[in-house]
Image (cartoon, rainbow, N blue to C red):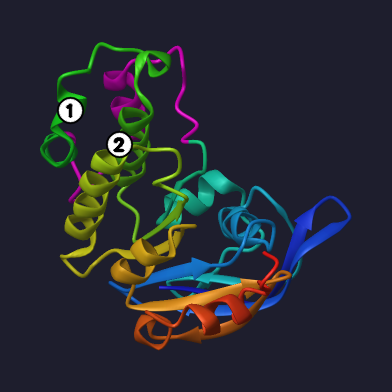
Amino acid sequence: MLEARQLSGGWGPTRVVEDFSVRLGRGETLAVLGRNGVGKTTLLELLIGRAQRGSGAIVLDGGDIALLPPHLRACRGLGYVPQGREVFPSLTVEEHLQIAQRSGEWTRPRVLALFPRLGERLGSHGNQLSGGEQQMLAIARALLGNPSVLLMDEPFEGLAPIIVEHLVGSIRRIVQGGSLALMLVEQRVDIALALADRCVVMDRGRSVFEGKPEALEGDETRLAALMGLGAHD
């Protein structure tokens, strides 16, 4: 569904991602791991079109989208849940859902069944929501675009454990149908590995490992070595 081929880029003249290649299949969940500052968020921003590509191809469902602006990538089936949620403070929950809706299997009733709390907050503005509610709204908004591939950047960041547990369950339900592919960037390695079918470890903008989560689960020494963490870290 989504493939990056020797992708490099970043912000202005600064290259953050270097010669990165990865493939994401239909219905697959891929976790992207790595310590802070190695290029995980920039990778997603390159894929969605907000960072500046230097070289390489981005292929979505067989077509190269590397030259398309973000809104056309979304129309092609690429969804994005950004770090920090980026909900509009002046829009209500209802308005967020209305402007995001495109035809497809994800409908307003379906996302409200997934996140009942949003149904109770339809008249609330984005800046009146808790962090957990904002994250639910960011995910619901992306789903209503009916993407074939969904990119999620740090969806559990700064949330209470009970909210994290709820969101983990929600993400499992989102992907269980097998039609939606998910690329997940997450600092919580245990959660990411539990959700993923396959994982990639990034270090200094490059892929240094790609394989099954089972290869890393419980092996903190190997994971630390791949992530470039020493004993002093």
Q: Identify the mark nearer the N-term, 2 or 1.
A: 1
Residue 78 inside the magenta-drawn segment: no
Q: Is 3 placed above or below 149 here? A: below
Q: Which residue is mark 1?
A: 117
The answer to whether the residues at label 2 and label 1 have Cβ atoms under 8 Å apart is yes
Q: Residue furthest right?
A: 13
- Asked which secondary structure carries label 2, the reply is helix
Residue 94 inside the magenta-drawn segment: yes
Q: Residue at x 61, y 53 (%)?
A: 45
Q: Which residue is mark 2?
A: 136
Quarter occupied by the C terminus: bottom right
Q: Residue 27 got which mark?
A: none
- The segment highlighted magenta reads 85-108
- Asked which secondary structure carries label 1, the reply is helix
As measured in the structure, the alpha-carbon distance from the residue carrying label 2 to the one carrying label 1 is 9 Å
State which quadrant residue 61 falls in: bottom left
Q: Position of residue 74 (x, y in %)?
A: 46, 49
> Is residue 4 among what the camera can see?
no
Relative depth, front residue between 151 and 1: 151
State which quadrant residue 203 falls in: bottom right
Q: Is 155 placed above or below 4 here? A: above
Relative depth, front residue between 108 and 35: 35
Magenta stretch secondary structure, dominant: loop
Q: Position of residue 210 (x, y in %)?
A: 51, 84
Lateral position of residue 17 relative to residue 15, left or right = left
Amino acid bearing label 2: Met
Lateral position of residue 75 relative to residue 12, left or right = left
